[in-house]
Amino acid sequence: MVRLARLAEGSGFHEIWVCDHYHNRYVHSVLPLIATATERVRLGPGVTNPYLVHPAVTAAAVATLNEVSGGRALLGISAGDPLFLRTVGIQQKNPVSAVREATVIIRGLLEGKKVSFEGDHFTCSGARLRFPPSSRIPIYIGGRRRKMLELAGSLADGALINASHPEDIRECLEYIASGRRSRGKKFDAVAYMAVSVDRDEERARRAARSVAAFIAASAPQESLRRHGVDEAEVERVRRFLAAGDIAAAREAVTERMVDGFSVSGGPKVIESRVDELREMGIRSVVIGSPIGPDPERALRLISGIL
């Protein structure tokens, strides 16, 4: 992770987002290591969720990262993957309200306030950080569906749009706009794309299948119809994922799922997609997992064209 982070910074990337799943290396151990190995990139969890730890703990972790990195911390938060949460006995109840409450608590703590809060999910009684950040930490809310993105528009500094196809992203921008309270306030809408790049286009597409499986499994019905993806095929992928059989889920992914829920192929594929998103007003894109069958080589290919 540190080696990839150094390569990303040296290749001209501006931000590094590290996903937060319990089965991966722990995000709040990895991020400080990356912070001490880099000088310029902003970095943060992309995204964490409010179900595994209390928002006050997340606030402390991100404030620590901000201190270690010299003011470069970011925070991405959303509801998490329901399939993975279920494997540790957690039901993803009322995800929009959980993220709303967590964001309110975290923002207050990061601003150095004493937080008293009584919600449906979380309670704080005079909670306060003893080391409030010296600089403001932007909060991004991640998502794909209407209510979560409306929440992002109303409450956050930005949105991490979990989509790769321009039509899906255009729809998400409309959701964000409908939630905006102050159109004058700066807002950063970021396309968080599943990307797989390699000079061998078929190899790149094969590498994208696992990520495409999870995205297809949680995609809105409108998106499935837009990409001509059969609901029965998606349900088959869901069954394999629910059973923990990732290999079978990967094999059940169709070419239309790969097309609709990832940007996969040779370097020109990502270049064309980024150009199209720029025309839509997207200023930033995340080159998300898997990056490519060989992530280091993929980063070098991408940095050479963008």
Image (spheres, rainbow, N blue to C red):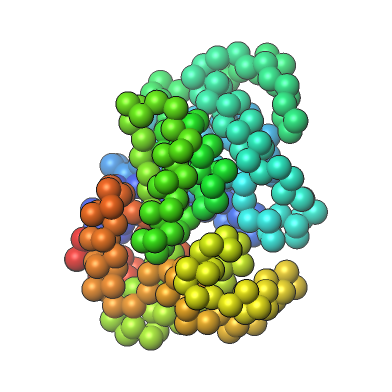
| Image quadrant where residue 285 sits | bottom left
User: Residue placed farthest to the right in the image?
Assistant: 89
Query: Which residue occupies the foreground of this view, 144 or 72?
Result: 144
Query: Which residue occupies the foreground of this view, 14 or 166?
Result: 166
- Left or right of 142? Residue 270 is left
Q: Position of residue 82 (x, y in %)?
A: 68, 56
Residue drawn at point x = 43 percent, y = 59 percent: 168
Residue drawn at point x = 29 percent, y = 42 percent: 39
Query: Which residue occupies the foreground of this view, 7 or 163?
Result: 163
| Image quadrant where residue 169 sits | bottom left
Q: Quadrant of the N terminus?
A: bottom left
Q: Position of residue 296 (x, y in %)?
A: 34, 68
Residue drawn at point x = 60 percent, y = 33 percent: 100
Give the vertical position of 180 relative to 25 (above or below): above
Answer whether residue 294 is visible to the viewer in this image. no
Q: Position of residue 102 (x, y in %)?
A: 62, 32
Q: Position of residue 208 (x, y in %)?
A: 46, 74
Give the vertical position of 249 relative to 170 (above or below): below
Residue drawn at point x = 38 percent, y = 86 percent: 202
Answer whether residue 265 is visible to the viewer in this image. yes
Marks counted in the figure total 0
Q: Quadrant of the C terminus?
A: bottom left
